Amino acid sequence: MKKRMNLQLFEDGAGAGTDGGQGNNTGSGNGGQGNAGGQATFSFEQAEEIANARAHRAEQSALRSYFQQQGMTEEQVRQALNDYRERQKANQPNAEKLQQERDDALAKVTQMENEKLLTSKGVRADDLDYVMFKVSRMVDEKTAFDKAAEKFLKENPRFTGKPYRVMSTSAQAGDGGGAGNSNEDINAAIRRAAGR
């Protein structure tokens, strides 16, 4: 719902009808609006628009006057005003671009901190990208990067540079070692149970 404002052109009443020029001038400042009985009705939005337009015209007039006082021609004044507007637009910050740059910088800082953490845990430079990828996939709302890194490196110690042993539970063919004896023991126990 629009609010309506009742704007009146005030006069002191003394001589309002005697001076023919004054009665004609009262309507000249309202942008050509009808002036029935000395009253014009505007909505708040219309009044604000009129005020902004007048302020803009006053600013342009002041700049034009200044440039002309400096000895510039009408064309030079117009060009100077256009240049001024372009500089104003260029000086306004691009919020989306600034936010994207901030997000990129934060992502780089986070990556460097994560790489430093993995390096401090002994991850070699050759394995750093792979370990970063694997650990990053383990990160979620409940698991932070450092906890995920600890878990991954505990399960995969070969990436930490620490010595580790590979344990085999299967016997290789032709192996006469302990694994073969273990199979023979199991087979003997099965034969005894079967009564053979």
Image (spheres, grey):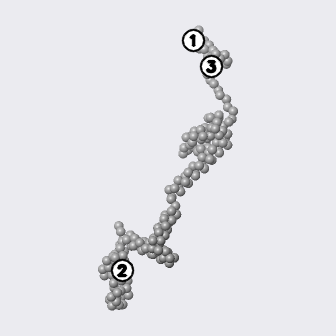
Residue 56, numbered circle: none
Vertical placement of 132 versus 49: above or below?
A: above
**Residue of label 2:** 28
Is 46 in front, or is 180? 46
Q: CA distance from mark 3 to mark 1?
A: 27 Å
Residue 172, numbered circle: 3
Pick whichever of labels 2 and 3 is earlier in the sequence.
2
Vertical placement of 96 versus 17: above or below?
A: above
Task: Identify the residue at horizontal 62%, vertical 35% (top origin).
Answer: 156
**Residue of label 1:** 194
Pick whichever of labels 3 and 1 is earlier in the sequence.
3
Using residue 165 as the reference point, say whether residue 22 is left or right of it. left
Vertical placement of 164 versus 129: above or below?
A: above
From the top left corner, tell me how far across and down residue 172 is, in percent.
62, 19
Task: Identify the residue at horizontal 62%, vertical 13% (top origin).
Answer: 188
Residue 148 visible in image: no
Using residue 75 as the reference point, say whether residue 98 is left or right of it. right
Task: Identify the residue at horizontal 65%, vertical 26% (top origin).
Answer: 167
**Callout 1 secondary element:** helix
Vertical placement of 159 versus 187: above or below?
A: below
Which mark's residue is nearer the viewer, 2 or 3? 2
Q: Mark 1 packing: few (<14 Cα in 10 Å), some, or many (20+)?
A: few
Amino acid found under the numbered disc labelled 1: Ala
Quadrant housing the C terminus: top right
From the top left corner, tell me how far across and down residue 122 is, in percent.
67, 39
From the top left corner, tell me how far across and down residue 65 is, in percent.
47, 77
Q: CA distance from mark 1 to mark 2?
A: 121 Å
Is 193 in front, or is 109? 109
Is 128 in front, or is 185? 128
Task: Identify the residue at horizontal 68%, vertical 36% (top origin).
Answer: 161
